[in-house]
Amino acid sequence: SGQFANGQGPEGYNYDEAKVGIYTLPDLLVNTKGKAVKTKVDWRNRRAELLKLFAENVYGETPANSVKLRFQTTSVDKSALNGLAIRKQVSIFFVDYPQLPPIDILIYLPKASSKPAPVFLGLNFCGNHCVTTEADIPLSARWMMGGNNDAVNKNKATEKARGMQARRWPIEMIVKRGYALATAYYGDIEPDFPQGWQSGIRSVLGDTTKATNWGAVGAWAWGMSRILDYLQTDPAIDAKRVISIGHSRIGKAAIWAGAQDERFAAVIANESGEGGAALARRWYGETVERINTSFPHWFADRYKTFNKRVADLPVDQHELMALIAPRPLYVASADGDQWSDPKGEFLGALHTEPIYRLYGKTGLGTTTFPAVDQPIGKTVRYHNRTGIHDVTDYDWEQYLRFADELVR
Ligand code: GTR
């Protein structure tokens, strides 16, 4: 959501590689009792330990409560996108919490394919009406970010918001390649401001008195799993091939969702930055302190206790992405988005390698930071695109190739 025009972020932060300094990452292959991880069984135990550490120290604990859902299909258009797609809208209602708004899912299915379709599942920033120029999507009535402008007035979307981020969602390209797209507004799960939790799922689940209570990123990740619950019931969807995808703050949620919920077949993190793919210990671009200050509602309160002592965090972000292994993982950066720390995202992806190897796979398979626009890797892939903090056709072309080769 490019709030910094130059893509570099605010002043006073480090953008000088020479100043990053020396840091020591926690060892993925040594558990908290000091024992080495040698086998897949050792790793499954270490994995459970890491999940817990990320919950307790970074994202907060996702409530284990099973929540009763009701799925209601509100519209089906058999000839969407000029006949290329079947478009469905499905709402997820929370049976025991009628005060919560439903999650409204927008789905495009490739009309040409007779088999259940693999699907990209990603939350959107501005309501389903903003991912497509198709006019008959109801305008989301939920709280929207932004001051008063043409597209948002008093935190409500206006007609001008239609299609506003369609460029980031090349739906035709996706369905032509045989994939479905499922998306929902992230604010359906929790509106993105410090008090937003009061009208979202965190108002009924979790424990606000605990420093380990979940944050908004955790809630968005949870919401992605609930959408996956629906997708598993839809015969048009290949539920074994659901790819968790997200950009920026939603990219952080996409990784956390894929880490916790192994039903996701793969994860794609587009410029997820701090609290996403980028190593926390690297002093470059956004910092733990800054993110916890600008966005106090995103993470567990305990994460804030590491603001001035990042080296004491019991985990770092390579360990989060290792939780995706052996499933395919794509980490993408943009060269004009130094705030997200492209090199730190690359290194986060790189340091997952031992776990992919444990499964007989090659992760990134290289330790060399690539030139811009040079996608690299095997089961773990990476690119650093030319341009600003954004999602472009270039990014999607790589994601579709990745999905063709590794998820299909
Ligand atoms: C920035 C934030 C980043 C990233 C970004 C976005 O303000 O510092 O961590 O989440 O917003 O979501 O676009």
Image: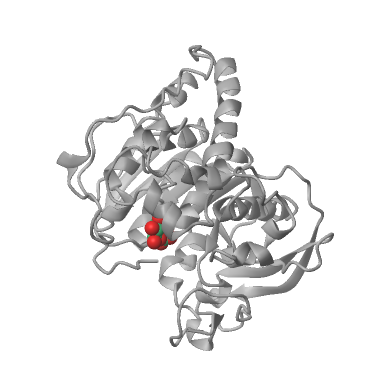
Q: Residue at x 74, y 73 (%)?
A: 74
Q: Residue at x 29, y 47 (%)?
A: 342
Query: Residue pushed farthest left?
Result: 18
Q: Please state the horizontal and vertical placement of residue 186, each as a whole percent of the image.
A: 57, 63
Tally the numbered discs: 0
Q: Please state the horizontal and vertical placement of residue 403, each as a whole percent of the image.
A: 47, 46
Q: Please state the horizontal and vertical placement of residue 162, each as a whole percent of the image.
A: 50, 81
> Which quarter holds ligand 1?
bottom left
Query: Residue pushed farthest right?
Result: 96
Displayed quadrant of residue 170 = bottom left
How is colour applied across the structure in the image?
one colour
Q: Residue at x 67, y 65 (%)?
A: 198
Residue closest to the eye, 303 or 46: 303
Relative placement, left or right, of 275 versus 136 is left
367 above or below 221?
above
The N terminus: image quadrant: bottom left
Displayed quadrant of residue 334 = bottom left
Relative placement, left or right, of 61 versus 348 is right
Q: Please state the horizontal and vertical placement of residue 63, each as a whole percent of the image.
A: 70, 45
Residue closest to the eye, 399 or 70: 70
Residue 110 seen in the current view: no
Relative placement, left or right, of 362 versus 387 is right
Residue 346 seen in the current view: yes
